[in-house]
Image (cartoon, rainbow, N blue to C red):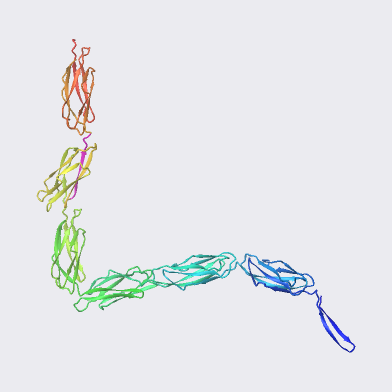
Amino acid sequence: SDDEFALITFSGSQIRGESESVRIVDDDADAGLSISSFPSSLNEGSSQTFRVRLNRKPSANRTVNVSSSNPDVTVSPSSLVFTPWNWNSGSQSVTLTSAHDADSDEGFALIALSGNQIRGESQSVRIVDDDADAGLSISSFPSSLNEGSSKIFSVRLSRKPGANRTVNVSSGNSDVTVSPSSLVFTPLNWNISQTVTLTAAQDDDRDDELALIALSGNQIRGESESIRIVDDDADAGLSISSFPSSLNEGSSKTFSVRLSGKPGASGTVNMSSSNPDVTVSPSSLTFTSSNSSRDQSVTLRAAQDADREDELAVIAFSGDQISSASRLIEVYESSIRVNLSKSSLVLDEGESGTFTVQLAAQPGNARKVTLAVTGNDDVTVSPDSLDFTASNWNTAQTVTVRAGRDADKADDTAAIYLMGDGIAAGSVSVTVHDDDIGLTLSDLDDLTEGGSKTFTVKLAAQPRKARTVTLAVTGDADVTVSPASLDFTTTDWSAAQIVTVSAAQDADKVDDTAAISLTGEGITSGSVSVNVEDDEDAAVGLVLSDLDNLTEGGSKTFTVQLAAQPGNDRKVTLAITGDADVTIDKASLDFTTTDWDTAQTVTVSAADDTDKADDTATINLTGDGITTGSVSVTVFDDEDP
């Protein structure tokens, strides 16, 4: 199968000989391969083709076998046939197909082309694993975000995945939220950007912050971006409470300070005084995010000076990221004593008393004296403050003290304190004598509807002034009292006064009860119970006249009336027992509330009988609401013995 050479010689007489060599190409030599469009890489689950042809004409058919060194990569077809007629008519194609595998490693496949009398060739192809982590392409990510605002950025995969991939988006700052919190990319939309919205909430501190936005997921190469959150809160305000309006020389007072909002890491409030005689302690307060809402105490102290003038001081408050503020305070030269007309008062409950107040010295500026009562809530003063100026300081002002009534029977005490800025405190003691007087009440008998009863009332002790006792009925509107009030003086307090209690008729048949309350200013309350017996069903007696003896065949009469007026109509039923020959002309009698005392006549008759004996009978009178009565009947026989 070797190529050979042949020497061709030209010679002749008188001819300069020549020779030429020719190579004899053996048609049994190996044919070379020309490979085109061979891919450098192949994704798992995909296919690509390349082309193959011979680089010279074979003397006979040649078969090119195609094989893969990687079992996950297949070739189709696995052999190509070239003939002396088609070897250069066009290349033949081979398809490479990469299967999915379970690992996440990329690999290679060596594609070998060989055959009898074929010079073998091989090419390598990189297998791109679709289980490998996909990278992320993030665009338009903002560098900063204002509190209370939103911005968006975009995300896509950097390469096509073999299957769906989920990208989880999270924020490392609770004040920054992401929406949506996850993105799903598929083999179809992997290169299409999806948007994520970042939103920064308002917070009550005053610091700029950072938020780390993390993007991660299974088979995703994680990425993270940081964003600065720009705080939009104004400076923290100050809440100053109990700041004094004035301060006496040589004394001190306190007030409280807190922030009206949270500071950043911390905030310092610096305080200063415009008057060197007034000092502030401490001169600064430090607030953090944890104690900003808690009051801190500050003390103002006014030193004694040599002049005799009242002064002013401005207390200034300032600090970094703190709203500035200031307060004015008056500094009084010294405390002025109050002159009181009385140091004590004695009052009865319900009475008033007075005392007067003036200053002992002229003030440099106006002074307010405040009055406060301690010890007894029933003691009040009017007015509760007095204003003195440099012109009226020695004019006495009147204070009225009133002792209210209470329910107990004990004497009370109280104290009235007079105080104020630049005022030396004074006091007035108050003694209140209890004047409540008890009542002496007699018993009240039970009443019947339509009737009345009485009871008496007098005071249990002599009052210091007149008392009025008011009577009121509760429980039954049919019960009334007369009179409705009783007046007692310091002289007739022990004389019993009569109260009449009346019970009107009503339509029901129920006993009633009521209560009479006795009250009054300076009176210990009392009460009387009232029991009213209903008269609708009360039994009424009968008034019966005598019945004369009868003779057989004769008749006599008797009369019937009620013994008292009934509450309603009554029916009296008559029935005879004893002798069947005795009869009456009425079986019943009707009485009303108006004719109850009008006598009604009953005729009694005795019939003849055949015997010769005298007879007797009884007429019984009964009925609802009637006290039973009876009439005896004697009948003399008229037969000869």
Residue placed at 19% from the left, 20% from the top? 604
The extreme top residue here reads: 640
How far from the left and from the top, in percent, is residue 515? 21, 44
Of residues 287 and 347, the one drawn nearer to the viewer in this rendering? 287
Question: Is residue 465 found inside the magenta-colored segment of the image?
Answer: no
**What's drawn in magenta, residue-wise?**
524-536
Q: In the picture, residue 175 is in which quadrant?
A: bottom left
**295 horizontally vs 383: left or right:** right
Residue placed at 21% from the left, 16% from the top? 607
Give the answer, above or below, for where 32 lies relative to 451: below
Q: Quadrant of the image for the C terminus?
A: top left
- Report whether residue 267 is seen: yes
Q: In the picture, residue 13 is in which quadrant?
A: bottom right
Q: Quadrant of the image for the N terminus?
A: bottom right
Give the answer, above or below, for where 379 lies relative to 40: above
Give the answer, above or below, for where 531 lies relative to 126: above
- Report whether residue 69 is seen: no
**552 horizontally vs 228: left or right:** left
Of residues 210 and 385, the one drawn nearer to the viewer in this rendering? 210
Of residues 424 and 565, the one drawn nearer to the viewer in this rendering? 565
The extreme left residue here reads: 491
How far from the left and from the top, in percent, is residue 52? 71, 71
* Prevailing secondary structure of the magenta residues: strand
How far from the left and from the top, in percent, is residue 7? 84, 82
Q: In the picture, residue 534 is in which quadrant?
A: top left
**58 horizontally vs 500: left or right:** right
How far from the left and from the top, in percent, is residue 533? 21, 37
